[in-house]
Amino acid sequence: MTREEKSQVIQDLTAQLADTSTIYLADISGLDATTTSNLRRACFKANVQLAVVKNTLLSKAMEASDKDFGELPDVLKGNTSMLIAEAANAPAKVIKEFRKKSDKPLLKGAFVQEEVYVGDDQLDALVNIKSREELIGDIITLLQSPAKNVVSALQSGGGKLSGILQTLSEK
């Protein structure tokens, strides 16, 4: 690979890192072709991009990026695959589901919404992260709850009041 090609790859990776807030780094070495193909299909179904990257080029792209990746460049050793998705927990769910059948992929680290997670032991925490849409839905539900209580109290109170007035008018 020539210097110009490497420079272009670094620019592309830097642009990719700037455009997304969810990046997972995993080790898929040792998977045979069929298993790797199945992993790629699972990623495609979950709307996750899977790409094998060179560690040095990704490290340079992280340095060139405006984001603070913290300890993430330190895990760039051995084979590295980058998983990128819109939903914060989609790659973690794909990895967890895939590991029911295989011992790989191993999570090296993740950069999710300005937070850095390092190590395979963080997988369960990453699976439980709620997406932006789920958080907005929870907030709307919480905001609607007091209003629903007030409306139901007024409706039940109005029914009682009309019942009392009707009883009094009949007497």
Image (cartoon, rainbow, N blue to C red):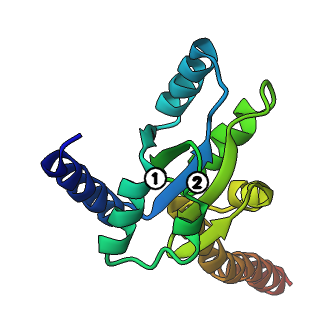
Quadrant position of residue 129: bottom right
Reading the image, the residue beneath label 2 is 77
Reading the image, the residue beneath label 1 is 55
Label 2 amino acid? Lys
Residue nearest the observer in this picture, 84 or 47: 84
User: Badge 2: how crowded within 10 Å, few (<14), some, or many (20+)?
Assistant: few
Quadrant position of residue 151: bottom right
User: Badge 1: how crowded within 10 Å, few (<14), some, or many (20+)?
Assistant: some
Residue 15 drawn at (x, y percent): 25, 60
Residue at screen point 42% across, 47% down: 54
Can see residue 112?
no
Along the horizontal axis of the image, is 62 left or right of 24? left
- Number of labels in the image equals 2
Would you place residue 127 above or below residue 28 in this image?
A: below
Dot 1 or dot 2, earlier in sequence: 1
Residue at screen point 19% across, 55% down: 7
Label 1 amino acid? Asn
Disc 1 + disc 2, Cβ < 8 Å: yes
Residue 165 drawn at (x, y percent): 76, 85
Real-space CA distance between mark 1 and mark 2, rounded to the nearest whole angstrom: 7 Å
Residue 164 drawn at (x, y percent): 82, 84
Along the horizontal axis of the image, is 51 left or right of 80? left
Along the horizontal axis of the image, is 151 left or right of 136? right
Residue at screen point 76% across, 83% down: 157
